[in-house]
Amino acid sequence: MRKFKTEALIIGIALIVMGMSIGSGLKSIAQGDRIVSVRGLAEREVMADHVIWPVVYKTTGNNLQAIYADVNKANASIAAFLKKHGIKEADISEPALQILDKQAERYVSDNNGQRYTVTSVTIVATEQVDLVRQLLAQTGELLKEGVAISANDYETRIQYEFTGLNKIKPEMIEEATRNAREAAAKFAADSGSELGKIQTANQGLFSINDRDSYSPHIKNVRVVTSVNYFLEN
């Protein structure tokens, strides 16, 4: 009889423990189902801090020696113009030449009877963004020396870059996370709940784009964070 009572007591304790465990598990499941997913946005406008400016000179002719002489003279004038206005010599690359021979190309249309088209590209890569923007409006000075700068096409368009992302990244992540928490807190309050701990969080990717097509030197930096919070009560 005593043995039976002992076994019954053990079974009873086991059932109580099992019940507590099941209750705790159900509570965890219930909490796990009560989650709010929110996103936080942070945006900033920044000025480009690096620019790549292809200075393009193009000419045509039938005599390669005469063309080379013309191109060399034009390149010397371009380099002198850049240095005169403050562009560092280290930021100016040697011109690269592209030669198109109409007679060697099957699908090239007639070029006003000129056999060769030579394109010379001097690359300016510098952090002097404001200076380059000023010089873009002063290239007419080269016309006085007979040097006509070609309009930039897609391959040789000027490129403005922002390289200081790492400096502003922590503050932007903090701002985006704070905005996400504010949105989650409002949702919790509206639903009669309390905001709990973070379940998962995803920083998201940073994007850097031109603010608009008219001011590519002004960049829009953007990041979106995704955060899941537990809801309590």
Image (cartoon, rainbow, N blue to C red):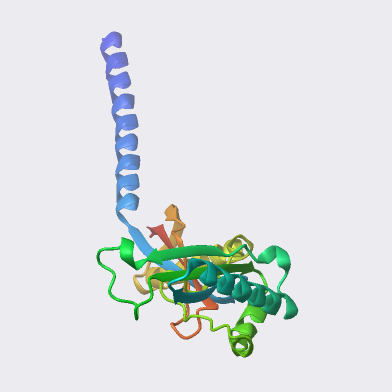
x and y percent of residue 50 in the render? 61, 69
Q: Can you say which quadrant of the picture contains the N terminus?
A: top left
Taking depth in this image into account, of 63 and 177 the one nearest to the observer is: 63
**Where is residue 24, by image quadrant?**
top left
Residue at 25% x, 63% y: name it. Answer: 106
Q: Position of residue 199 (x, y in %)?
A: 42, 52
Task: Please tell me which residue is depicted at 30% across the width and 46% down the height of the picture.
Answer: 29
User: Can I make out residue 51 in this image?
Assistant: no
Q: Quadrant of residue 131?
A: bottom right
Rendered location of residue 190, percent (x, y): 36, 74
Q: Residue 15: horizontal and vertical position, in percent? A: 28, 28
Position of 151 relative to 206 (above/below)? below
Q: Is residue 125 visible?
A: yes
- Residue at 29% x, 44% y is 26
Image quarter of the C terminus = bottom left
Say which residue appears at 27% left-offset and 19% top-offset. 8
Residue 229 vs 129, above or below: the answer is: above
Q: Is residue 31 left or right of residue 92?
A: left
Viewer-side residue, 6 vs 102: 102
